[in-house]
Amino acid sequence: MRTEVSTYQMRYQMTAGDHGSPIQLLSPDGERHPNEHFDHYLDDVDGESGAQTLASLYEDMVVARRIDAEGTALQRQGQLGLWPPFVGQEAAQIGSAHAIGADDFIFPSYREIGVAYVRGASLPDLVRQWRGNAHSGWDPFALNMAPSQVVIGAQTLHAVGYAMGVLFDGAETAAVTYFGDGATSQGDVNESMVFAASYQAPVVFFCQNNHWAISEPVGLQAHVPIARRAPGFGIPSARVDGNDVLACLAVTREALERAHSGNGPSYIEAVTYRMGPHTTADDPTRYRDPNELEDWKERDPIARFEAYLGGLGLLDDELRSRVAAKADAVAAELREATIHMPDPAPGSLFEHVYAGPHSVLDRQRDQFERYHGGISSATLVEGGH
Amino acid sequence: MIEQNPLVQMTFAKALNAGLRRAMERDPRVVLMGEDIGKLGGVFRVTDALQKDFGAHRVIDTPLAESGIMGTAIGMAYRGYRPIVEIQFDGFLYPAFDQIVSQVAKLHFRSLGRVKVPITVRIPFGGGIGSPEHHSESPEAYFVHTAGLRVISPSNPQDAYAMIQEAVASDDPVVFLEPKRRYHDKGDVDTSVGLDGPGGLAMGSARVASEGRDVTLVAYGPLVKTCLDAAIAASDEGVSVEVIDLRSLSPIDYATLETSVRKTGRLVIAHEASRTGGLGAEIAASIAERCFYYLEHAPVRVTGFDIPYPYSKLEFYHLPDLDRILDGVDRVLGRPNSLSGTEEGE
Ligand SMILES: Cc1ncc(C[n+]2csc(CCOP(=O)(O)OP(=O)(O)O)c2C)c(N)n1
Ligand SMILES: [Mg+2]
């Protein structure tokens, strides 16, 4: 028994580290590495005309981080029931989201709040479910983005099914699904890869490996880099530096190009880090070495991008103050919208359970209204129908 | 000197932790499996410090895959282990549902009793803690409907402490439903109660939680406390309510229920789960069959509605509370109630 235990522990620790270096176009100190394969996906970013694209990536990352901080603050003040911070994952989310076309359909987990922001979700729609006012926010068909998914991994199958529909329709759009490192262990996620490969469905799997699934390190889920799993299913994959917004943008564009041109599914592992707790209910000091967080702060995605912009001479006072003002305004609006969000009407409990009438539930609704109408009201005494 | 039983005040969660610890000390083949149960001690801290004390080979953090956890637990059982599986929240057990219903529940039967499946499936269940979706469900009816599973739910720290040990010792698979909104409730626990202590074993039997003459009020898990509060409120109005804590949902201890209903002639059943096909339906039908001539009124159910568990702002409109339970008591007594003047209200 002793030896079995120590073998187990040894293997577990050995594989907790990374293998294979991820695709990186910006080094942590903000230096741009030319890349033969990926550079042509960044034609609108590199060179003279790129200033605007770069500024919009920068703005979205900064605003996203501010939304996240505001979400945490609102939860601490009792305005939200829970909040899943994505601080540290801005490059992975904003970079990939900027690659996705308006006609492509996204199937996210719960943490893609930055993606939803880029997609155009209204600010109240970002927090509605975390306040407990509804089970979802935005209209999926207005944004081409499904409601956030709490059941780990379930959405990956939905993305593949959507992509199968695209394929059978002969259309040229694609589906993109986001999920975490922990999710890669779920049967659903593995089955979704089987289906995607079998039909050569136009789908992009975007795994944000933020190194943790609540308290479980990624080494418990996989003994090889997660990206290496996909080829076993017959799906080409890439391992990308998830804190490099340009790399995330380029790699996602490549994958979508493959999907749009009839070349089937792709799988991206974006190697990033969950700098915050799992949710505001979590206490990472119970399971995580604080030095690890310090290490990852050195690789902060926004600081890296600022260094790059600075090197290009683009990070002037004008850009800085414009972006800061935008972040302030968004945060203030989010706060106002949250604090003044009206509670749902009690009767809404019974709405949308079915698309049509349902005799049993309709009767329960009548009784519910009667009960909350008060048993002594005059109308009740008269009106037994 | 007479030996006093050591009464210790504990939270519900701590009582479970102590019961698990005792079960692990008693039998080295008992192992815990689940997500985040090691260093973190589970999201509710029920397994706090157990990995530190028993090692990573007995308190096993698993990959994030419920079907995987349940299926491998079955394999461990073939090897003679007694796995205790933790499902993190009720809403996340469904990926494991196939393994539970098609495999765990049936293996003893289909192997002609040759393969025992002494797995305990711990599931924090029920609502009332302000969570997002999939964190507040009451799936008990699915399991009660599945032959081969025992289903139990403690309502207080003492029973939690004793029943978890019994569940682990059972050679049958046990679905162990923990009322998560009661995890922080405190109560006195007699730690001598347990498998190797004197009597007091709880698992298969219902408990008369408070005696009464006029109405039998049946509940389990999270609503037992609410029903006890309702009984006190009713007694202020001169109505004597007998509260029965089922503890075991499969099998149901009908002997205890029958004795009570023969005395009171009136039955109210309360649960958080949806009404249709719920435990209340089963109990009402069985008591009607067994005690028809003793009943003064049709049994009354006070339950969650037939809706998906709602967003937290409205959850207390969905969950039976003290007032709705008292309304049910009024109904079964034929007193003025929310249905008075309607057909249902007679
Ligand atoms: C089916 C299922 N099991 C368990 C959970 C509880 N849970 C919520 S998040 C989480 C960890 C997810 O980790 P990962 O996939 O890496 O995503 P991250 O949270 O890091 O973004 C777990 C276990 C769940 N939501 N769904
Ligand atoms: Mg993760």
Image (cartoon, rainbow, N blue to C red):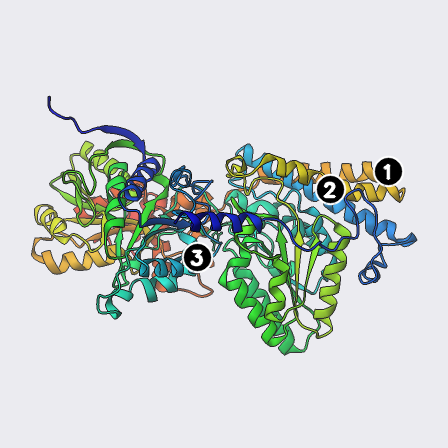
Residue with the most extreme front position: A3
Q: Residue at x 50, y 36 (%)?
A: A286
Tell me the SS state at disc 3: helix
Is the residue B30 above or below the residue A169 in the image?
Answer: above
Q: Is residue A59 left or right of residue B62?
A: right
Which is more foreground, mark 1 or mark 3? Answer: 3
Is the residue B91 above or below the residue A311 in the image?
Answer: below
Give the distance between the C-alpha atoms of the residues marked 2 and 1, in whole angstroms.
15 Å
Pinpoint residue B34: horizontal percent, then vertical percent: 42, 50
Q: Amino acid at mark 2?
A: Val
Which is more foreground, mark 2 or mark 1? Answer: 2
Label 3 C-beta lies within 8 Å of the nearest ligand 1 atom: yes
- For label 3, the residue is B66
> Residue A62, which numbered label?
2
- Residue B340 visible in the picture: no
Q: Quadrant of the N terminus of chain B?
A: top left
Tell me the SS state at disc 2: helix
Tell me the SS state at disc 1: helix
The numbered mark 1 sits on a residue in which chain?
A
> Residue A318, which numbered label?
1
Q: Nearer the viewer, residue A261 or B337?
A: A261
The numbered mark 2 sits on a residue in which chain?
A
- Crowding around mark 2 (Cα neighbors within 10 Å: few <14, some 14 to 19, many 20+) is some
Residue contact between numbered discs 2 and 1, judged by CB atoms under 8 Å:
no
Q: Is residue B239 left or right of residue A210?
A: left
- Residue B209 visible in the picture: yes
Q: Amino acid at mark 3?
A: Glu
